[in-house]
Image (spheres, rainbow, N blue to C red):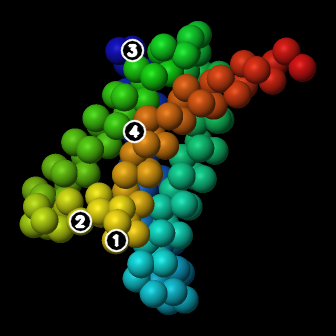
């Protein structure tokens, strides 16, 4: 993997922090916990999509396959960060960390991870298909 793909993932941390602040200081005052969580998931998907769209020319993927590889590596980095930060730094118990994976309870973490995986290839494909118009 190229270093720039790893470097391109790093702004996910401030995007996540910004999204968390928005969730805690705006959404949480207006909505119940589940709706707050869901809206925060949708907001992250939107913020992350805008970010990926903006950096696509710099990423210079060149192929859908590279987009898939970048998306996969970003998911691995995201999960690694989530579990290391959550468990080691924040001291969250493992069941608490896995709770957000429960889509049957309305938790959207899996959807966020799927978008993290798909965003590079999906947006790359969209850009490529619209360059010919």
Label 3 or label 1, whichever lies nearer to me, is 1
| Residue 7 visible to the viewer | no
Dot 1, crowdedness within 10 Å: few (<14), some or many (≥20)? Answer: few
Q: CA distance from mark 3 to mark 1?
A: 38 Å
- Left or right of 92? Residue 77 is right
Q: Residue at x 51, y 86 (%)?
A: 31
Disc 2: which residue: 99
The residue pinned by badge 1 equals 105
Q: Quadrant of residue 126?
A: top right
Q: Earlier in the sequence, mark 1 or mark 2?
A: 2
Which residue was labeled with disc 4? 10
Report which residue position mark 3 lands on.
2
Q: Nearer the viewer, mark 1 or mark 2?
A: 1
Residues tagged 4 and 2 counted as in contact (Cβ below 8 A): no
In this view, the residue in front, 103 or 72, is: 103
Q: Nearer the viewer, residue 32 or 74?
A: 32
Choose the circle earlier in sequence order: 1 or 4.
4
Which is nearer the N-term, disc 4 or disc 2?
4
Residue in view at x 16 percent, y 49 percent: 84
Question: Which mark lies nearer to you, 1 or 4?
Answer: 1
Q: Is residue 58 above or below residue 86?
A: above
Check contact, mark 1 vs mark 2: CB within 8 A: yes
Q: Residues within 10 Å of mark 4 (few under 14, many from 20)?
A: some
């Amino acid at each position: 993997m190229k270093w720039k793909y790893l470097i391109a993932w790093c702004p996910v941390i401030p995007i996540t922090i910004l999204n968390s602040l928005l969730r805690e200081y705006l959404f949480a005052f207006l909505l119940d916990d589940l709706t707050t969580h869901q809206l925060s998931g949708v907001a992250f998907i939107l913020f992350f999509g805008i970010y990926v769209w903006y950096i696509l020319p710099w990423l210079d993927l060149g192929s859908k396959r590279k987009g898939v590889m970048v998306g996969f590596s970003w998911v691995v980095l995201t999960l690694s960060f989530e579990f290391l930060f959550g468990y080691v730094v924040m001291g969250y118990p493992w069941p608490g960390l896995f709770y957000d994976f429960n889509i049957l309870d309305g938790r959207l973490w899996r959807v966020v991870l799927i978008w993290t995986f798909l965003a590079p290839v999906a947006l790359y494909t969209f850009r490529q298909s619209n360059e010919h118009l």
